[in-house]
Image (tube, helix red, strand yellow):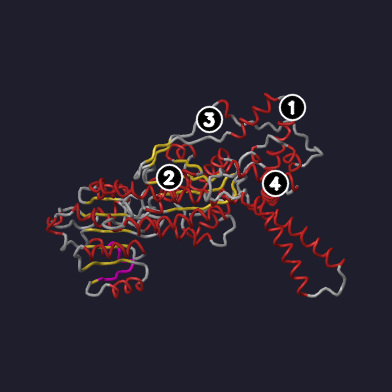
Amino acid sequence: MAVSTAFAGPKLDTVFLGNAVASSSSSASPFNHQIDRVFCMPQKSRFSRNCNNLKCEQLQTTSNEKVIDDTSAISPSSSLSALEQLKSSAADRYTKERSSIVVIGLSIHTTPVEMREKLAIPEAEWPRAIGELCSLNHIEEAAVLSTCNRMEIYVVALSQHRGVKEVTEWMSKTSGVPASDLCEHRFLLYNNDATQHIFEVSAGLDSLVLGEGQILAQVKQVVKVGQGVVGFGRNISGLFKHAITVGKRVRSELNIASGAVSVSSAAVELALMKLPKTSHTTARMLVVGAGKMGKLVIKHLVAKGCTKMVVVNRSEERVTAISEELKGIEIIYKPLTEMLASAAEADVIFTSTASETLLFRKEHVADLPPVGADVGSVRLFVDISVPRNVGSCIKELETARVYNVDDLKEVVAANKEDRHRKAMEAQSIIAEESKQFEAWRDSLETVPTIKKLRAYAERIRLAEVDKCMSRMGDEVSKKTKKAADDLSRGIVNKMLHGPMQHLRCDGSDSRTLSETLENMHALNRMFSLETEISVLEQKVRAKVEQQNQK
């Protein structure tokens, strides 16, 4: 799926300049309070969550959350640059709150497959998508998790409201799905809720089948693909790496995958549920596609007693490798050119390919010979591909039935009680890990201050040691120099120990984030470190330069 590069939002320098002028036009406290309310009250999503489902009501913009953006009075010849205005604007929202982690998602729980397949982004396009997302005005970092069951965009946004708006517009442009339809089906989660969600996803709690292992492998692939990609930054990378840790821990401590099945296994189970029991080992099986999902389908068929099947694939090498792995199983390879001929001799057809066009249409299936009464006189198509490989209109034929990934819910419905119990146990692990991740992310707030304070102290220490050595003359021994250096270093470390302790916010003590940030701002003022504004300048300069290069 091609990802458009045409989207470009309003220039940041114009937006910032407009905000700065708006804030400086009046110094009365009521107006300043209004500006704070407008720019510092992110909208919140209201949602209900359980271990298997997640619903989110569409965001509603209230009258007192209305965004003010009036740049009509700005003169092009203004002597102050956008950055200077930004630094002098005490009301600017970006200095009031840190960036937010946001997930904009559409999953099997909220969105039909017809929409998900339009939004799907192939793995090869993920780096390109990350680059385009990070070129949006209010997006710093991004990641894409696109599978057959979900399409989720994770971002670090400078502004929650504007970031969500920009990403939604980008998704609409790249998929062709109207933004209004996306808003109807999407869910939005912020910060702690976004963290908890990706942890649940990685643990398999949000999957159609509890504990299925494929999603953990897909989360790992996001990290693998994101390595070295500009925009897959520290926050998003840390989030997904921690999610992998959570997924592994839940599976190992709770054995949550025991008895659970993957999407491929559920597809086999569904097919066997639809076949007469007497035909389970005799039905003629055809698997189209020998990739990861297709290989799993073959293995699960073998586990259910199937000893012979036909596999259609673009190349023979993969089929041969699978055949060598599964000794004693008759696997017959057929090229794609013989797919319809192979389908004519099959009772059950599984499709799992990356094709973006339909492989089986109504007119193809209508011409196939009927199947025997021993399999119910109905040919079964089980399509676990997204985008789909089998046209839904085939179900209009009396001689065929079509099932896709959305139909797999039937397979796991009987296991609800066990799923709920294990999911509740897993939630305690997820809560613990979420707290650790949030503490790590909170600690990042003070990292620039810690580095600058240490550098400031080190400059003073070196200068004083050099001054002392010069007064003592040229006859000072190396031992004396080392002693003086060690003494000065020890004094500085002991002096910094207290301030550094009060900049910690890693969950190891009772200090709150607000207390830590107050300490950070105090140190910035006392030692003129100006950490906050310099970091802000770097972010804004990078965004403005990106826009100017277009």
Q: Amino acid at mark 4?
A: Leu
Tag 4's secondary structure? helix
Q: Which mark is residue 56?
A: none
Mark in front: 2 vs 4: 4
The residue that mark 2 highlights is 106
Calculate the distance from the C-alpha at mark 2 to the C-alpha at mark 1.
44 Å
- The local crowd at label 3, few if under 14, some if 14 to 19, many if 20 or more residues have their Cα within 10 Å, is few
- The local crowd at label 1, few if under 14, some if 14 to 19, many if 20 or more residues have their Cα within 10 Å, is few
Tag 2's secondary structure? strand
The residue that mark 1 highlights is 27
332 inside magenta stretch:
yes
Tag 1's secondary structure? loop
Calculate the distance from the C-alpha at mark 4 to the C-alpha at mark 1.
28 Å
Mark in front: 1 vs 3: 1
The residue that mark 4 highlights is 523
Q: Image check: 59 left or right of 84?
A: left
Q: Amino acid at mark 3?
A: Thr
Q: Amino acid at mark 1?
A: Ser
Calculate the distance from the C-alpha at mark 3 to the C-alpha at mark 2.
21 Å
- Would residue 550 be visible to someone looking at this image? no
Mark in front: 4 vs 1: 4
The residue that mark 3 highlights is 61
Range drawn in magenta: 331-341
Image height of 326 relative to 57, above or below: below
